[in-house]
Amino acid sequence: MIRMLLIGPPGAGKGTQATYIAKKYGIVSISTGDIFRENVKNQTRLGQIVESYLDSGQFVPDSVTNEMIRERLRQDDAHNGFLLDGYPRTVSQVHFLDEVLANRGYELDLVLQLTAQMEELVQRLLLRAERENRSDDTAEVIRNRMALYFEQTTPVTSRYGERGILTRVDGVGSISDVCTRVSTALDLALGSSSRFTTVSADNSLEWALQL
Ligand code: ADP
């Protein structure tokens, strides 16, 4: 059973790697961005609250994001491990998550950070904009999201670095190259402890074609 985070700048390929890791370890992948987008699409109450933040590339207020995550982690499928993709992104979210987990006697096993150069990231996002029509993949909003990531998330990764649970992986290269790197890094970081069962060695990439 693994409880882990996936952190990376916009365009680093978090979604693809999250799918890969979740499948490898048989854990649920929880993406704050996906949950928010789904709620906006369905125009739920949460969706109406967060829509303007997503459109402008700003962070959704911590109070909203934190409560959403607390509720999500309460669901049955998160009891046997999880991968959080895109959360926490601020130091206050780090503290909130620590508390939620500690209340249940849990702690994080690992934080995986995907890295990439800024130019590569912008290129990927502009490509994705042509394909997926996301409201936040325009040049100006991309700049906003990048700036926020580097400003707000650097202190987050430093915290986990100090705890000794941060592993960095270069996210530049083909999807299969990055999956291999991620896999090697996870195996190394988690060791061969029987707590961390690999449920599938399937390297098939058909399901992992998103950026
Ligand atoms: P990206 O990392 O490429 O910006 P995501 O899908 O992870 O894409 O997030 C999309 C948007 O969802 C963010 O720009 C932000 O508005 C909101 N969001 C996602 N995660 C968080 C979070 N942890 N805290 C605040 N806002 C968030």
Image (spheres, grey):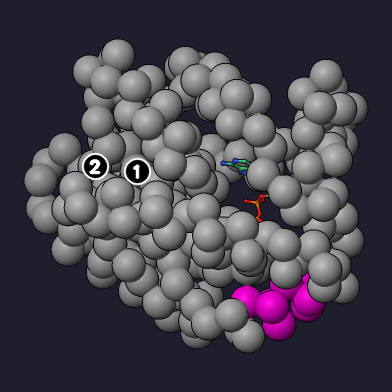
Residue 127: say if magenta. yes
Locate the N terminus by quadrant: top left
Q: Earlier in the sequence, mark 1 or mark 2?
A: 1
Residue 31 percent coordinates (x, y): 58, 42
Which element is circle 1 on? Answer: strand
Which element is circle 2 on? Answer: loop
Q: Is residue 79 visible?
A: yes
The answer to whether residue 15 is above or below residue 182 is above
Residue at x 78%, y 77% (from the top left corner): 127
Nearest the viewer among 22 and 103 is: 103
Residue 132 percent coordinates (x, y): 83, 62
Circle 2 packing at 10 Å, graded few (<14), some (14-19), many (20+), is some
Q: Is residue 38 visible?
A: no
In-image side of 167 versus 78 (left or right) = left
Q: Amino acid at mark 1?
A: Met
Give the residue pinned by disc 1: 4
Residue 128: say if magenta. yes
Q: Are marks 1 and 2 in contact (CB under 8 Å)?
A: yes
Circle 1 packing at 10 Å, graded few (<14), some (14-19), many (20+), is many
